[in-house]
Image: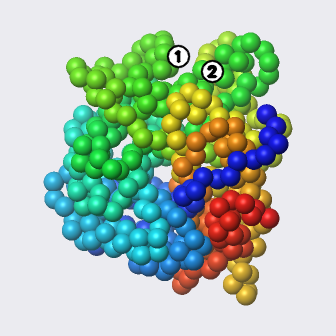
Amino acid sequence: MLHKTLKQFPKGFLWGASTSAYQVEGASLTNGKGPSVQDVKTPPAGTSGFEVAADQYHHYKEDVALMGEMGFRTYRFSISWSRLLPEGTGRVNQEGVDYYNALIDECLKYGIQPLVTMYHFDLPAALEERGGWANRATVDAFVEFSELMFRSFGDRVRYWLTINEQNMMTLAAEAVMGIDFSKFDNPNKHVYEMNHNMLLAQAKAMCLCHQMLPDAKIGPAPNIALVYPASNKPEDILAAQNFNALRNWLYLDMAVYGIYNNLVWSWLEEQDATPENIQVGDMEIMRAAKPDFIAFNYYSTATVAMPGPGEAGTSGDQQRGATIEGFFKAMPNPNLPRTEFGWEIDPIGFRNTLREVYSRYHLPILITENGLGAYDKLEEDGSVHDQYRIDYLRAHIEQMRLAISDGVQMLGYCPWSAVDLISTHEGIVKRYGFIYVNRDEFDLKDLKRYRKDSFYWYKKVIASNGEELG
């Protein structure tokens, strides 16, 4: 669709950026915080752990001041479950509550709306030891955690995100969460029973938010990427429908409508993997939980074909897809360039995805991650020339504006990431931030902050409400 005149970004559009607690805060086992699964897992070879990360715990005033200088209207950050509840339930760490109160107040001082992710890959290790998300008690623990957050911060936090990338914790659980499923006779059944408990926890949190904070807004935050067929063969179109359902619609159908996607349920039946932990009343709770908006993380689209008979399955990460025997096979897209880390770049696919999500669910959309990981270089004069990141973000913002002109209702845009942080898979060398943090993989240096070229560019974008992208 070609537009003679483009619509403007809405007044009050939430320009900002994102981080997550375990990747940016540091102070990982200090100040009363208990260990999370991210603290106890073994990092990938050659990458640092999360003990210090970007040390935002001790630099939050400096970081928020820089965000204020950029003109942020929102800052999307997550709250560490084990910083508030070191054992995941029970005893409250008041020092953790005080830290997030201070961070929220610092944001508000600069006119920055806090956008809080309630859970971002960092389940308390104490809960994981008791079965993690496979244990129904973890649902109750998440509700307890949610109530504590709403009670402690709800007077100042208007926007809440439930669970970051639940679909990636399901599809790439070993890579994202460090969980070994080889000990299970039927790993799929175990994974999708965990997934059901997370869906139920999310639904209960949304209901509780609306009850405790009637003026607040809450929504899910999966990683959504439209899936293309590798060709116009009918069987490849079936494969694309299959992966769209498994990767995307399972999570949004449940969040919005409280139903299991039919294609996914049929596949689970074939795998003898339908969740047996669905209890009486669960589905009623799911249907009662109505999100106010849909948030999602977008990096690129996916492309699949139908695998041949007996073609074996393979694993993948958030953006490099897997193969499931008889269901779909991940394929490279020859029409798309790739980042230095092998992720495809598809700005037009961003518009495609926005259009599809909005047409299916008709809820406002908030982008909670979108960005380019790269090897940034700090020059002797303290500058960082990241034109590649500017080009990437510009192209995606242009496509977002086209989607708005298509009639998609957008709430905000929060690229990944506000400051450099530790990538879950590639460590600190894979940098995303507008703000450079002076540390290497195993040399903490001075952790000094530097403004990248993209910092100054994004400042102009925000000041012009998306009009000035040059």
> Residue 204 placed where, x, y %?
28, 37
State if disc 2 and disc 1 touch (CB < 8 Å): yes
> Residue 416 placed where, x, y %?
58, 58
Q: Residues within 10 Å of mark 1 (few under 14, many from 20)?
A: some
Secondary element type, mark 1: helix
Q: Which mark is residue 436?
A: none
Q: Which mark is residue 263?
A: 1
Secondary element type, mark 2: helix
Q: Tell me which amino acid carries mark 2.
A: Gln
Does residue 377 appear in the picture of this structure? no
Q: CA distance from mark 1 to mark 2?
A: 9 Å
> Residue 133 placed where, x, y %?
32, 38
In which quarter of the view is residue 446 placed? bottom right
Q: Is residue 272 left or right of residue 95?
A: right
The mark total stands at 2
Compare residues 437 and 414 and report the one nearer the observer: 414
Q: Is residue 297 above or below residue 197?
A: below
Residue beneath disc 2 = 241
Does residue 170 appear in the picture of this structure? yes
Quadrant the C terminus occupies: bottom right
At x 80%, y 22%, the residue is: 231
Compare residues 256 and 280 and report the one nearer the observer: 256
Compare residues 50 and 232 and report the one nearer the observer: 232
> Residue 415 placed where, x, y %?
60, 57
Q: Is residue 186 above or below residue 404?
A: above
At x 36%, y 59%, the residue is: 157
Q: Tell me which amino acid carries mark 1.
A: Leu
